[in-house]
Image (cartoon, rainbow, N blue to C red):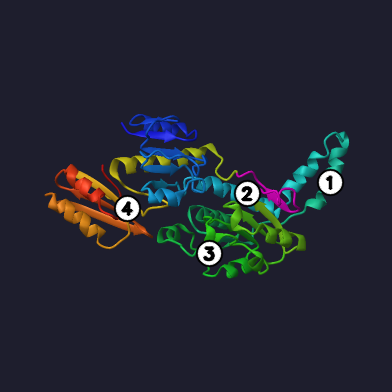
Amino acid sequence: MKKILALNNISKIAENKLKSDYEFGTECADPDAIIVRSFAMHDYDLPASVLAVARAGAGTNNIPVAEYAKKGVVVFNTPGANANAVKELVIGALIMSGRKLVDGIKWTDTLKGKGAEVGKAVESGKKAFVGKEISGKTLGVIGLGAIGILVANAALALGMDVIGYDTYLTTDHALRLDPKVDIVDNLDDLMSASDFVTIHIPYMESTKNTINADNIAKMKKGSAIINLARGELVDTDAVLAALESGQLSRYVTDFPSDKLIGAANVVTIPHLGASTPEAEDNCAVMAADELRDFLENGNIRNSVNFPACSAPRQGASRITVIHKNEKSVISAITEIIGGAGCNIENFVSQSRGEYAYAIVDTTETIPADAVKAVSALPSVIRCRVV
């Protein structure tokens, strides 16, 4: 029986799905796979038996993805599983960025103990918290993935005009996007036309400070920014300077920092984007399904360090090969399998950067010595029969 180690408490729905066919638990010797949420794996002593790690969430900053790729360990995430939860919080943040709800709530709390004077104080004090409606305003959505699409479509339903920007917009995502969303191919065009901007792209070195002093200066005076994606996507110093000058009216973020907490016109939320039981269930179930399909069929879906590669099973045997994306590797694999007297019924191969992955189905059972020979090829990182 294959074993899955949970390094965090995982939704019971996913646990129950796996427990019927796998040894599953928070303590497990020589696991075949690991499922994780927030556990920091950068200093974790990864067992040599591990074939895959699944993160029950979209971000994988807590996992040494590149290091695991070198070891042939496939890292999965669960894009879109928490999209609705994040979308709903964005809508809340959007309203908070237009209306001074947080300031008003904090002020109202100070009226405790004033007895019959509360009503009069409220009527005289509320003018300090006048805000603006979002209907009829323009929302700029940076990143049109699973979350960005939901946010854009929801904003349209709330009466907003929506501009979208995504340098990697897929056909599938484009088809799910309301046609009334205006797609631009220049970030400055989005920034200059928007009353509100929300960002939904992954954080990496190339996306650091995507929102910065230069493009904030191009925004309408008094605009607002929402960042529920990653703190590093927005230049904090530039935002604080823009708030002080009045160029920005509000910054709402799910990633508090010491500089941001308590700053005027900043609303900090304690990273609640996916903190709903529904989102946690969806992420855990999706992670469990990805691990099962990989362990049992060798299919890779939603990996962050290897290419997507899957195929329905055919024939009597299946071999999967993780290898460096180098010349002649595929021909060497097929030559070994063919030389062992096996007829190849189906061969699927995909590459991603410096790595590639192949799935080979054969009519006959692949002999152990052929598997050993494939594993011994200089470019092969990991080979297994599933």
Q: Nearer the viewer, mark 2 or mark 3?
A: 2
Numbered circle sitting on residue 123:
1
Can you tell which quarter of the image residue 249 is in?
bottom right
Compared to 378, does 163 lie above or below? below
Q: What residue is disc 2 on? A: 255
Closer to viewer: mark 3 or mark 1: 3
* Magenta run includes residue 255: yes
Left or right: 164 as drawn, with respect to 290: right
Residue 14 visible in rendering: no
Image depth: mark 4 or mark 1 in front:
4
In the picture, the disc for residue 165 is: 3
Kind of residue at badge 2: Phe
Question: Disc 3 versus disc 1: distance between alpha carbons?
Answer: 42 Å
> What is the spatial separation of the Cα atoms under label 3 and label 4, in whole angstroms?
28 Å
Q: Earlier in the sequence, mark 2 or mark 1?
A: 1
Magenta stretch: give its range: 254-271
Q: Which residue is mark 4?
A: 309
Q: Secondary structure at mark 2?
A: loop
Q: Amino acid at mark 1?
A: Glu
Horizontal and vertical percent for residue 82? 50, 45
Going from the N terminus, do you reach mark 4 or mark 1 first?
1
Instruction: Give the residue type that dot 4 points to.
Output: Cys
Q: Is residue 277 magenta?
A: no
10, above or below 361, in the image = above
Q: Is residue 203 visible?
A: yes
